[in-house]
Amino acid sequence: MSEAALDVRAIRSGYGEAPVLRDVSFDVRPGEIFALLGKNGMGKSTLLKSVMGFLPLHAGSVGVFGADITGLPPHKVARREIAYTPQEQALFQDLTVEDNLRLGMRDDTFFDAGVKRIGQFFPVLPTRLKQRAGTLSGGEQKMLLVARALMSRPKLMLIDEISEGLQPSVIDRLAGVLRAERDESKVSILIIEQNVKFALSVANRYAVLKLGEIVDRGDIGGADVERRITDQLSV
Amino acid sequence: MATLLDILTTAAILYSVAAGLLIVFGVMKIINFAHGGFLTVGGYSALLITKLGLNPWWSVPCAFAIGFVCGMLIERLVMKPLYSRPLDAILATWGLGIIIGQLITLGVGREVQFVQSPVSGTIDLLGGTYSGYRLLLVLVAVVIAIGIALLLNGTRLGLVTRAVIMNENLARGLGINSGLVRFITFSLGAGLASLAGALITPLSSVDPNMGVPWLINAFMLVMVSGVSLVSLAVACLVLGGAQVLVSSWGNPILGGLTIVVLAAVVLRLRPQGFSRG
């Protein structure tokens, strides 16, 4: 197997002394979408914060494209062509759409080209560049989040519950964009989700996180996958 | 007329002093109590220029540069290790302010000294005469305000700085080195404090504790302004204006208390102070 886009190995982490994640291991292969499913409070967001270096690991290691990034501060992790989209307070509400997009890039050199590109996915955004991000609708804010992540042309995207609270039509749109990025730009994507239907519509493989441990994993495609995951999430 | 000009020039001086404190507060979420110390450093920088017999205009860039370098050193040696402990960081700045004052006392003594003004005499304005230097300070405050606004709104560094002010963790997750932003901001704040100190000295005198009353007023002004430079300008005009009125119609001692007392009242009635929202 070629080196993983993201290789999470036996990590333990949490807030202060209290462990939230216990020996969690999985990998995201180059050019695939991996869905990590779980209900609230199971440690999904904690996992992303640990990967990004916001939370210190008590044990284990994190690698991206063959390089060990364990213990690096968040900005250095992000600079390894990783786009992290947190679930909460993920936009600068008081900055314009344009400034939010600029912050997705390391410098302004390719800004115009980037806006043109994301305009193909989300035609509404280039028309709202001067509007404050906080005044966008809920769906538009989520589009802006994905657009900001795409601005830097990342090799790996980490996306925390992008589908939460969205209308089905917007979810379909986002799913289409993620699939296109994977298929055409070979971006590796880790999505954290509670929405099983959305996850199944985009992902290649999945794992279920429960109380800080992975309790199930597999390929998406089997006939009974949806029922299996739904059962896991409901108990 | 003279009263109006007094209000305008007082507000300008207060703004020059408080601007650096405000940007440090915005980025680092702590009040830098060494700000008064940096201001004193600026006063002595101006004194040094006078003692060397140089053109007093030199005190402006020199004070800024000396303050900036002091800020750089202190940020790396003292502040950076304390970023995860904001309360300790605030205490450290308090201590630093005292240390700076004591070092100056040890080095040059306690006595009050005077600095040469780059501009002397008065200017005829609107049917009266007024101190040319005080009018110049209004211009300087406007230049400082425009300079900071351009830096914040017109540059990549400014955008990144605003991002850190609004949500530091989000900024870090996007690849922004917030430690570097803190470093630059703290140094810039120290440079601005020192610059303000050099600008003030021709109006008063230089002594090792000259920064203390300014620090207290600037602190209160920042508290009522939130993290907005526009609110700060409003606060300086309103509270500085009140100070001038109380000093000229009441007495100067009460005038010295005006900003602190009014700021406390404002915060009691309107916790967000002069900032919008």
Image: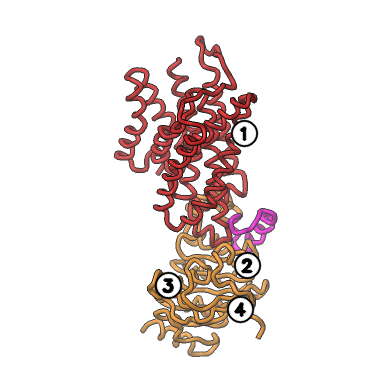
Chain colours: A orange, B red
Q: Chain of mark 4?
A: A
In the rendered image, is residue B121 in sight? yes
Q: Nearer the viewer, mark 3 or mark 1?
A: 1
Q: Which residue is mark 3?
A: A14
Name the quadrant of the N terminus of chain A: bottom right
Q: Which residue is mark 2?
A: A80
Q: Amino acid at mark 2?
A: Arg
Which of the two discs, 2 and 3, labels the residue nearer the N terminus? Answer: 3
Q: Are marks 3 and 1 in contact (CB under 8 Å)?
A: no
In the rendered image, is residue A125 in sight? no
Q: Nearer the viewer, mark 1 or mark 2?
A: 1
Q: Nearer the viewer, mark 2 or mark 3?
A: 3
The residue located at (41%, 85%) in the rendering is: A232
Q: Are marks 2 and 3 in contact (CB under 8 Å)?
A: no
Name the quadrant of the C terminus of chain A: bottom left
As drawn, A200 above or below B21 = below
Q: Which residue is mark 1?
A: B61
Region of the chain picked out in magenta, as a range: A101-125
Callouts 4 and 3 on one subunit = yes
Q: Amino acid at mark 1?
A: Pro
Where is residue B240 drawn, in percent x and y?
A: 41, 28
Q: Chain of mark 3?
A: A
- For the residue pair A38 and B171, the one nearer the viewer reads as B171
The residue located at (37%, 31%) in the rendering is: B259
Quadrant in the picture for residue B68? top right
Label 4 to label 2: alpha-carbon separation: 18 Å
Judged from the image, the secondary structure of the residue bearing numbered disc 1 is helix
The residue located at (40%, 32%) in the rendering is: B213
Give the label on residue A32, or none: 4
Which of the two discs, 4 and 2, labels the residue nearer the N terminus? Answer: 4
